[in-house]
Image (cartoon, rainbow, N blue to C red):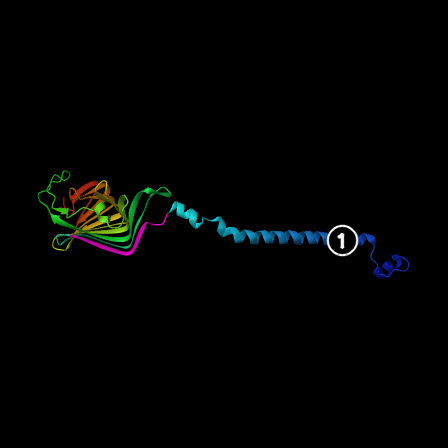
Amino acid sequence: MLWTAVQEKAPPGKGPFHTYPGSRVKRAFFLGLAAVAIGIVGATLAIWLLSSRRLPDTTATPSSTAAHYPAPRTEIRGFDVTHTAEGQTVFRISADAFRVQHQKVGHFRFGLVQEAVLDNARIELHVVKDSSSQSRETKATSRYTLVQNLDHSVLSGFTKGRIAGLRAEPATVVLVAENGQPLSRIDGRRATVRFKQGDILFEGKVRVSAGARHLVTERMTLRPETGTIAVDGRFTMENGGLRTEGRRLVVDLALEP
């Protein structure tokens, strides 16, 4: 039997549970390996915990973010302003928020030029009939013109710096006739009042409605100087049961040719 064999091989004076020098070396070796493995696991866990705690510090800090996107110079929530002249309303601008900030160029903003930004804006521009103004584009009499064009003076009370333009995202512009009724309505993802060019550029799913007439395009310009709306690109015009498509269009503010 095994028990007997072990007993017989045991040295004189040693019991059956006697450990030999070779077995002690093996046990020490395996215990050392176990200790090394535990140390490696512990070190890995410690490194992971330290790296997870440092993770927020590796992201952009407020100071570095501010260098790319400085805080607005002026910010007004619930913005609503109405301008009148000689008792007559010229325009009204309302928006969820109004900001004056450095103009963005690429991923940076620079302080040399500023821009005004409107969030979810509604702009009412009052128009009057002006049969004396001749449109060079339509070769016909322009029936409506703005009482006053939007220019730098619109924002003179909100900032002292140079303003390149006014940008609204999204934007609804309503042209109001002398009787107080809407002449036409323009909706778009973005409207940019370009002071230098003296016009308003609409971009992104632009839709103009004037009575039974509807114009749909991606890019359109309202030109107050001539009292016209110009489309240089694909458009669709609907007037009752008549549907017209084309690539260039110039009409007056009531969508009449």
| Residue 107 locus on image (x, y percent) | 38, 43
Q: Residue at x 31, y 53 (%)?
A: 75
Q: Is residue 225 left or right of residue 48?
A: left
User: Which residue extends farthest left?
Assistant: 132
Is label 1 in a helix, a strand or a loop? helix
Q: Residue at x 66, y 54 (%)?
A: 38
Instruction: Look at the image and tell me in which quarter the C terminus lies.
Output: top left
Q: Residue at x 45, y 49 (%)?
A: 61
Depth check: give the residue in front, 107 or 236.
Answer: 107
Residue for badge 1: 28
| Residue 240 locus on image (x, y percent) | 16, 51
| Residue 166 locus on image (x, y percent) | 26, 47
Q: Residues within 10 Å of mark 1 (few under 14, many from 20)?
A: few
Report the predominant secondary structure element of the magenta stretch: strand
Instruction: Look at the image and tell me in which quarter the N terminus lies.
Output: bottom right
Q: Is residue 203 visible?
A: no
Depth check: give the residue in front, 218 or 153.
Answer: 153
Q: Quadrant of residue 225?
A: top left
The amino acid on which the numbered mark 1 sits, given as a three-letter code, is Ala
Whether 243 is among the magenta residues is no
Depth check: give the residue in front, 91 or 199.
Answer: 91
User: Which residue extends farthest front?
Assistant: 160
Depth check: give the residue in front, 108 or 121.
Answer: 108
Q: Is residue 152 visible?
A: yes
Q: Quadrant of residue 198?
A: top left
| Residue 172 locus on image (x, y percent) | 24, 52
Residue segment shown in magenta: 70-84
Whether 73 is among the magenta residues is yes
